[in-house]
Structure formats: structure tokens, C-alpha cells
Amino acid sequence: MDWSFIFFLNSILLGIGLAMDAFSVSIANALNEPRMKIGRMNLIAGTYAFFQFAMPMIGWVCVHTIVEKFTSFEKFIPWIALALLGYIGGTMLVEGIRKKQADTHETGSVLGFGTLLVQGVATSIDALSVGFTIEQYQFPMALTASLIIAAVTHGICLCGLAIGRKFGLKLTNKASILGGLILIGIGLEILIKSFF
């Protein structure tokens, strides 16, 4: 493959496809934290973008170094994503139910950095297999494709955060329940997609 329009278009489309899980998680996070500031939105979107950049590059390196071990690990990727997102979503769901029962008027809890990192891994772990689709690229092209994927992810996640923030203010304590259900649903969707 050469540096053509098709290369850039493929990278953008790949970025859009890979960013959909992070987009949904962004909505869920902003539903849970509707008063989120712009700097925090950029931190969250940047974290997801970083992992969407890193995972294809890690996959590309694996293809060029330890292919056999990576292919045996690949079947566990959807299960890992389900476990991580299920845990985070379940925690948000329980918190939302407790808040509802306590009838508090808080607008959601702040997403911790550790949880953000886990979400970043969970929403991008399927991008490891993108290393196989870009394996014919030389390093500069693989790096460029991964940077394009990261930029697309950042933009899409900012949109998701803005959407979630807008509706989170209207939903108040129901937002945490909805956000938890969204995360669990994304984990199940990743698992189901792996079978087809």
C-alpha cells in the first residue's frame, strides 16, 4: 500500500468503526457526570484516543514479532472487554440504584482515573486485531494510520461527551443507571460480534 487517498480514507473509516464503543462509553460517562468541564472532556476523549492509537500499533508489532502467541490470545479479547465493561457498568448501575433509593439530588459521581484507564483498554482492546489488517504497512504508514484512528476517536468521543452531558442534566440520578446499562450492553455487543 502506498500513501494514497485510499490509505487515508481507509484509516478514517477504520477510526470511525473502532471509535463507536468509545463514543457510547463517552455518552455513558457524561450522563453520569453532566457538569463535566471542557478540560475533563478532552482528558477522557484523549485517553480513549491514546488507547485507540496504541492498540493497533501493539497489534502491528505483535504481527511482526510474536504472531503465534498473539493469535492464540485473540479469542479472549471479547471476553476481556465484556468483563471490564460489565464490571464498570455494574458498578455504575448499583450506584445509580442506591442514589435513587436514597433520593439524593446529586448530578452524578466523578469518573476516577483508574476507571477511565480500564474503560480505555476495554473499548480499544478489539483494535489489537487491527494490527493484522495493517500488517502490510511499513512502520511510518502504520504509525500514521494509528494517529488518524486516534484523531477520529478523539473527535467522536468529544461529540459523545457533549451529547451525554446535555441529557445527563435532564436525567439527574437516572443517568448513572442508564450509563451502567449502556456499558454492559457494549460489553455484550463486543462479545456477540466476535461470534459472527
Image: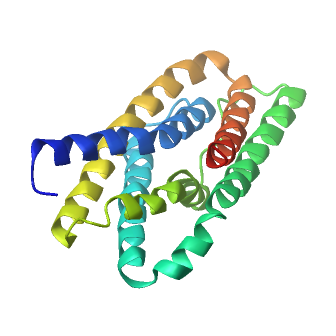
Q: Residue at x 53, y 75 (%)?
A: 70
Q: Most extreme residue toward the top, as rendered?
A: 170
Q: Would you say 153 lies left or right of 184 here?
A: left
Q: Would you say 117 lies left or right of 183 here?
A: left
Given residues 11 and 37, the one toward you in this image is: 11
Q: Residue at x 61, y 74 (%)?
A: 72
Given residues 166 and 132, the one toward you in this image is: 132
Could you say which quadrant of the image residue 37 lies in? top left
Could you say which quadrant of the image residue 188 lies in? top right
Could you say which quadrant of the image residue 41 lies in? top left
Q: Residue at x 25, y 64 (%)?
A: 142
The image shows residue 24 at horizontal and vertical percentages of 54, 35
Q: Quadrant of the N terminus?
A: bottom left
The image shows residue 83 at horizontal and vertical percentages of 73, 56
Q: Quadrant of the C terminus?
A: top right
Q: Most extreme residue toward the bottom, as rendered?
A: 65
The image shows residue 185 at horizontal and vertical percentages of 70, 36
